[in-house]
Amino acid sequence: MQQKIRIAPSILASDFAKLGEEVRAVSEAGADYIHVDVMDGHFVPNITIGPDVVKALRPHSRLPFDVHLMIAPADPYIEAFAQAGADIITVHPEAGPHVHRSVQLIKSLGKKAGISINPGTPLSAVKPLLDEVDLILVMSVNPGFGGQKFIPEAKQRLGHLREMIDRSERSIDLEVDGGINFETAPEAIAAGADVLVAGTATFKGGPTAYAANIARLRGQR
């Protein structure tokens, strides 16, 4: 069953010169999660931030930190991100030889575990993990950069995963990330997503616009 719609602003699109202020601002503006994109320049063609930045940001918000590890290997860094303050840690099945072990490690640290599906990753990769994961992240762009265009095929993938989650009868977040804006957000929600990662659409217009942007993404005016 689709849960309430939650908005997870991606700090990748924020002003990095004042990251703490940006996290506080979107938290106060009504965000539900803080989405942290971690990239290593190897698994994806970009480099972003590490555990020390997560630790530095942790005092600026009480919201769950939704940390997406686009790194390979992921396992050696999971504990560091957990200790830094991540609440949800999401890995890719391609980021290590034993994704089930990665999920078990995350759970053993007392954190929620997510699995991320790239546009070219078969949905069958999710099935063996349905009893373990707390979140499934559908990438609606190829990961690595913000501001990309939403891939329409992601809607069909969201629909299939919505059915899979509902059959499992577990409360698993179905998150979507990539090209989410005021036009594509309603489409993603209709397809079954209940957590929307939005960077550019959230941070557009500066802090005074964040509350309205978040409300509009959620389907409110």
Image (cartoon, grey):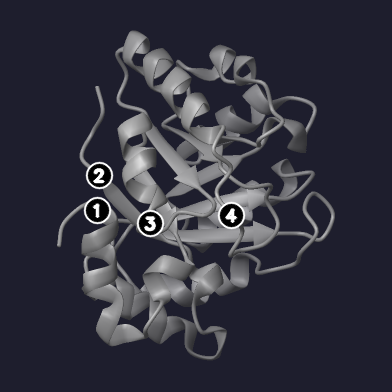
Whether pointer 1 and pointer 2 mark residues with C-beta atoms closer than 8 Å, the reply is yes
Residue plotted at (66% across, 35% down):
119
Q: What residue is drawn where x is 58% and y is 42%?
A: 151
Residue 102 location in percent, x, y? 64, 32
Judge left or right: residue 186 versus residue 198.
left
Residue under pointer 3: 8
Q: Eyeballing the image, is 106 above or below 206?
A: above
Type of the residue with mark 3: Ala
Residue 149: mark: 4
Mark 1 secondary-structure assignment: helix
Camera-side residue of 48 and 200:
200
Q: Which amino acid, by three-letter code, is at mark 2?
A: Ile
Give the residue at mark 2. 5
Q: Label for residue 218?
A: 1
Q: State the quadrant of the C terminus.
A: bottom left
- Give the spatial CA distance, label 2 vs label 4: 21 Å
Q: Residue furthest left?
A: 221
